[in-house]
């Protein structure tokens, strides 16, 4: 499945892919938009390998960073007004933008499919019970070609073997990165590690 092959039905959103791309482009910097497009391409490659619905993958990938560049005050106000977990505010936009992005996906794009919303919501920290779609978006975000992390090449190899193997490796590396720099680890990240990395050792 290539990007040019994708035509959205009205099952998940009334927007066409072209309209969605235009909205995302208007919301993000060029650098962030380019990242989103690479994530979509990578996610679709994984979707084909692991038989995940390409429409859902495309929508979730395009919207996964929709809230990434919101101003801090706007992000904070959204977390509070939407009754999201206030603990997120202690960890900044890196954590908040997934759940806040899911709110935008639901309210601005009328996306009601919980799998798509969860893929957007959980793409940074994961969760204890992740669908195949959630795993695809989480992994694609980490292994898209321009990611320069020294651990990305290994993650790319694992992604060709198993979504769970790649997920376990990535969540472990993310935690090690934070620990090495003395940065607090968001509890949901630890829960994902416990659910996927420990059992895969």
Image: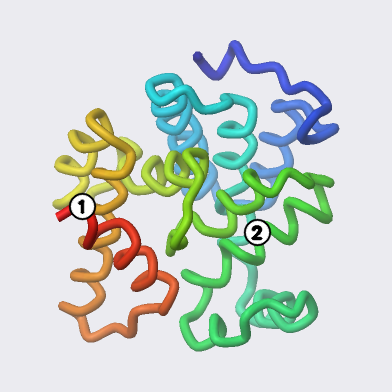
Q: Residue at x 50, y 14 (%)?
A: 1
Residue position marked by numbered label 2 in the rendering: 101
Looking at the image, residue 188 sits to the left or right of residue 155; the answer is right
Residue shown at the point (21%, 37%) measured from the top left:
158
**What element does badge 1 sit on?**
loop
Classed neighbour count for the residue bearing mark 2: other residues with Cα under 10 Å, few (<14), some (14–19), many (≥20): many
Q: Which percent across, then down, holds residue 97? A: 57, 65
49 to 84, vertically: above or below:
above
Q: Quadrant of residue 48?
A: top left
> CB of mark 2 within 8 Å of CB of mark 1?
no
Q: Crowding at label 1, few (<14), some or many (≥20) Cα neighbours within 10 Å? A: few
Residue 83 left/right relative to 135: right
Element assignment for label 2:
helix
From the image, which quarter does the C terminus lie in?
A: bottom left
Instruction: Give whichever of 138, 78 is nearer the camera.
Output: 138
Q: Earlier in the sequence, mark 2 or mark 1?
A: 2
Q: Residue 200, which numbered label?
A: 1
Per the rendering, the mark at residue 173 is none
């Amino acid at each position: 499945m290539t990007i040019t092959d994708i035509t959205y039905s009205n099952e998940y959103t009334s927007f066409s892919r072209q309209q969605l791309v235009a909205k995302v482009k208007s919301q993000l910097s060029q650098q962030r938009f380019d990242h989103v497009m690479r994530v979509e391409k990578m996610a679709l490659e994984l979707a084909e390998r692991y038989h995940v619905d390409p429409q859902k993958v495309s929508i979730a990938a395009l919207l996964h960073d929709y809230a990434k560049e919101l101003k801090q005050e706007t992000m904070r106000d959204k977390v509070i007004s939407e009754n999201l977990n206030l603990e997120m505010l202690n960890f900044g936009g890196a954590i908040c933008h997934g759940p806040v992005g899911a709110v935008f996906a639901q309210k601005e794009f009328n996306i009601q499919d919980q799998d798509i919303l969860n893929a957007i919501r959980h793409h940074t920290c994961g969760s204890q019970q992740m669908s195949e779609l959630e795993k695809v978006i989480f992994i694609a975000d980490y292994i898209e070609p321009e990611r320069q992390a020294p651990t990305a090449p290994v993650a790319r190899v694992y992604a060709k073997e198993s979504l769970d193997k790649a997920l376990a490796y990535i969540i472990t590396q993310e935690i090690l990165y934070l620990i090495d720099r003395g940065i607090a680890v968001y509890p949901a990240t630890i829960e994902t590690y416990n659910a996927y990395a420990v059992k895969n050792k």
